[in-house]
Amino acid sequence: MLAFLGCAADPTYSASVATSEQISTLVEVSYSPPEAEAWVEWEGQRFDGAEGRAVVYGAGPDATLELTVHVGDWVSEPLVAQTGSLPVEIPPFTVVDDGPLAPRFVLTSWLESPDEGSGVVVLDAAGRVVWYDLVEGVGTVAFLHKVDGGVLYLVATHSYLPEAHAVWLSDDGRDRVTYPLPMAHHEILPLPGGGFATLVGEARQVDGEDVVGDTIVEVAEDGTQRTIWNAFDHFEVEENEGWGVQAYPEGADWNHANGLAYDEATDRYLVSILRCTCVVAVERATGDIDFIVGGPDSDYAVDDAFGPQHAPGWTDDGLSMFDNGYDLGVSRLAEYTLAGDEATLRWQWQHPGGYVTAVLGDFDRLDDGSHLSSWGTLGEIIYVEADDTLSWRVDVEPLHVLGQVEGFESFE
């Protein structure tokens, strides 16, 4: 892509722009002298530079930008830049409800069905892909988070768990760190202070049968791993419907843990286990189980049964989840209050079409009381205002599944 040069009477300063070679929806700005304090202005937004370079985010594909570069007290003439087209592997996203969207950007992932491709995308309110990464090699992405300076995601597929790995990719696409995580699946969760937690399967032989149970593993920034909790230490292995599902070549799918949350205030994890239709609270320091909600070993009587479920979350007085709602006949977002020995449904929001999300599903309650959710096999992301009014919805092309979803305001 051609670069456009900004000129001024003072030859000490210069600036040029070009399409990013790593991510075609980004514009890279080079300026001189590189040690000067510099920033770029585009549509009222400021993008700070460092070491002779700045990156402009949010334009989307095939866009023409006019921007100015500020280097010290020098201001360039308006510069024109062009973003590139999207890779053909990225499916179309269509906004079907175009009301207000509180987060400026929405991070999610797509999985092509059958398993033929996957990637990570950031959408704006118009449904444009403004940032992306494609999965190379074996595996798909369903679980991911925006972290400072980049995106953290897990590449895993049940049939290829030995090749599972985590990826941290910088916002500008230039820096990539890969963490090999054999048998990791279903969740990757950034931790306060750095590092992340994930779910890792462990294969054991129990009474002559190969069985896969789950563990919670923390990974430090240098790749060091430590196991926080192991299901084999706390539950008796009993045959369930996972024995008839070929989810893991390594053995029977005993737990099928599928979601993880962490509460810094109490230093506890919350892990969703599909096969027992339960959510388990785990003490991080000891690995002990604090309580169980749902299933045959529940410490609480659940007044409105859930399950199967994904995306557990902590609330001030209980927990939240994405309830796939097979028995209800409709998927929903749900929050339960835990008091005494009762788990009471205090709030729910059902899919407006009355549909069931067969696989995956995510739910994030935002600070203002609104919420953002993804609906897995239904291929929808929905933003709902604090009064439970559906405001914004985007659909992905049919035969694609959506992973986790997260809203954020800025790349910087």
Image (cartoon, helix red, strand yellow):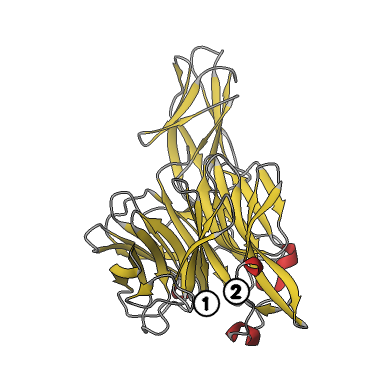
Q: Which residue carries the number 1 mark? A: 276
Q: Secondary structure at mark 1?
A: loop
Q: Position of residue 262 (x, y in %)?
A: 49, 53
Q: Quadrant of residue 351?
A: bottom left
Q: Which residue carries the number 2 mark? A: 255
Q: Nearer the viewer, residue 7 or 85?
A: 85
Position of residue 121 in the picture relative to residue 184 (left or right): left
Against 78, is 322 above or below?
A: below
Count of marks, rendered view: 2
Q: Position of residue 168 (x, y in %)?
A: 62, 48
- Circle on res. 289: none
Which quadrant of the rendered structure holds the N terminus?
top right
Type of amino acid under label 2: Asn
Q: Is residue 126 visible?
A: no
Against 42, is 217 above or below?
A: below
| Number of other residues with Cα within 10 Å of mark 1, as a class: few under 14, some 14 to 19, many 20 or more | many
Q: Secondary structure at mark 2?
A: loop
CA distance separating discs 1 and 2: 7 Å
Q: Nearer the viewer, residue 24 or 106?
A: 106
Q: State the residue at coordinates (62%, 67%).
A: 231
Q: Position of residue 40 (x, y in %)?
A: 46, 29
Q: State the residue at coordinates (56%, 13%).
A: 12
Type of amino acid under label 1: Cys
Q: Position of residue 280 (x, y in %)?
A: 50, 65
Q: Are marks 1 and 2 in contact (CB under 8 Å)?
A: yes
Against 320, is 228 above or below?
A: above
Q: State the residue at coordinates (74%, 73%).
A: 204
